[in-house]
């Protein structure tokens, strides 16, 4: 129901823009997030829209990644700038929180989301 695109292989310092389109469901303005998972590691939250429409970022990507959305088009974006080798991972979008969240950490728990995409590979 969520389809990501835009991944690829770029040199360190390069940029990518990921997109996530919803099929068959409609995005709410909050409870939208990007996660990533590197081989052998757990899935980790990267960026999210909070219930107050604020943006939340993992410390490792602050100042380099930007999450944005077009609710009318049911599309979520992630702009990745100044890519580093450690950003290499499969990137997933997620939507619809199963629970109420207030703390930033809550938005970065994978099991709190109902819908997931299949992922798009980013190699930095």
Image (tube, rainbow, N blue to C red):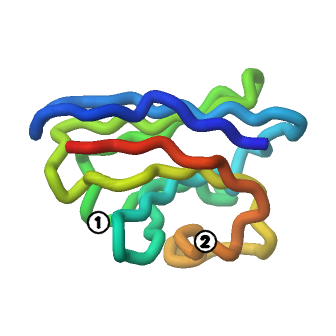
Mark on residue 110? 2
Residue 93 position within the rendered picture, expressed as x and y whole percent measured from the top left: 59, 49
For image coordinates 54% across by 47% down, the residue present is 119
Name the residue: 76% across, 74% down. Answer: 100
Q: Residue 50 appears in which quarter of the rendering?
A: bottom right
Q: Position of residue 20 (x, y in %)?
A: 61, 35
Residue 105 placement (x, y as % from top left): 51, 77
**Front in this rendered view, residue 49 or 117:** 117
Looking at the rendered image, the quarter that the N terminus falls into is top right
Query: Residues under labels 2 and 1: Cα distance?
Result: 17 Å
Of pointers 2 and 1, the one earlier in the residue sequence? 1
* Picture residue at 37% right of the left edge, 75% below the top: 41
Q: Position of residue 124 (x, y in %)?
A: 20, 43
Residue occupied by mark 1: 59
For the view shown, which residue lies furthest in the left direction? 12
Q: Is residue 26 above or below residue 106?
A: above
Residue 84, relative to residue 39: is it above or below? above
């Amino acid at each position: 129901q969520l389809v990501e695109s835009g991944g690829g292989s770029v040199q360190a310092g390069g940029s990518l823009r990921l997109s996530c389109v919803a099929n068959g469901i409609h995005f709410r303005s909050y409870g939208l997030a990007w996660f990533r998972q590197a081989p052998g590691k757990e899935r980790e939250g990267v960026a999210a829209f909070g219930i107050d429409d604020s943006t939340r970022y993992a410390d490792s990507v602050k100042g380099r990644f930007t999450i944005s959305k077009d609710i009318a088009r049911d599309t979520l974006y992630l702009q990745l700038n100044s890519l580093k080798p450690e950003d290499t991972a499969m990137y997933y979008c997620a939507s619809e929180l199963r629970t109420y969240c207030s703390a930033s950490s809550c938005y970065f728990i994978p099991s709190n989301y109902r819908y997931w995409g299949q992922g798009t590979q980013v190699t930095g």
